[in-house]
Amino acid sequence: MSETDPSRITSYPSACSVVPGLSSRQRELCIRHPETMKFLINGLRMAITECQHAFSNQVWNCTLNTPGVGTTPLKIASKESAYVYAIASAGVSHSLAKACSKGLIEDCGCGPTPASLSNKFVWAGCSDNVRYGNSFGRKFIDVTDKIHSDARALMNLHNNRVGRRLLASRMEKECKCHGVSGSCVTKTCWKVVPNTTLMVREPILDGKRTERYLKDKSNKHKEVFQAAKGELVFLDPSPDYCSVDTRGRECGNNCDEICCGRGE
């Protein structure tokens, strides 16, 4: 990730010119929406931080080899890359959705009120605006891969969608009681995005439940298109992470794997 201070972008849109890894279209969006970019970058950082925490006891600990906001974080199209794209897209949408509901972005406000009715509560309050988060996140994150039609670009776009759809499908109901002395005469509820720590541990995103390795080299384009909506896809087998020196890392209760049999 870039070390650019996102707070500077809000006050100085010209700072968009020094954010590493942006395409011309992404830089244009950055200049036009400096407030939104602040929270977009925060969302990326949040996602990667959570990823590194979740994988801290694994040989691959969410180390990214390419810095920059708009760059490819992992050159190999492995399942780890699929995960990073999905969680980064979800992180961006999460941050933007929260910022909208708090009134921190001029371009958006509260999320839509659900149409369902209940005799136990009333839909009210300010829901997180995941619709805006997903929409702006898609415009920014997907723009580079959308101009290409190779299998890697299709893989990235697909996994981005998995992350955004997962976030939208995991929105939770949050409620507040109203009444005298803490009684709950009436209850108002709204929708919020899930906790980010829980998001990165979703079976869909951590690779424990649903992923597809596209082995057919001649038919990868078609396979990406046919992949299930909630299924991560990747094109290459994972590299041997034990070939990277893991000395100096804390290994907790997983020393045999992290140290790759070299001893503690």
Image (cartoon, rainbow, N blue to C red):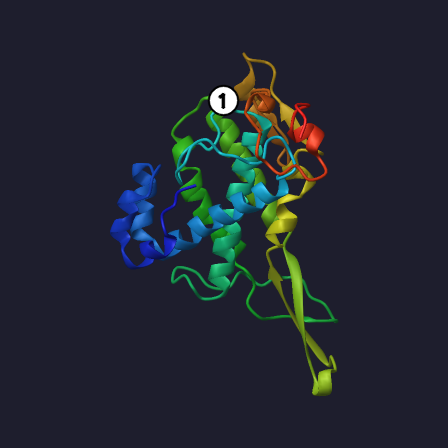
The residue furthest top is 218
Quick one: 206 or 174, which is closer to the camera? 206
Quick one: 27 or 131, which is closer to the camera? 27
The residue at the point 50 percent across, 54 percent down is: 95
- Indicate left or right for 19 with 214 as reference: left
165 relative to 110, above or below: above
Give the residue at mark 1.
151
Residue 3 in the image: state x and y as whole percent: 38, 45
Asked where in the image residue 207 lies, by quadrant, the reply is top right
212 relative to 201, above or below: above
Residue 134 at least partly seen: no
Residue 7 in the image: state x and y as whole percent: 36, 57
Q: Quadrant of the N terminus?
A: top left
Give, as a three-letter code, the residue at label 1: Ala
- Indicate left or right for 79 with 121 as reference: left
Residue 170 in the image: state x and y as whole percent: 65, 51
The residue at the point 61 percent across, 61 percent down is: 191
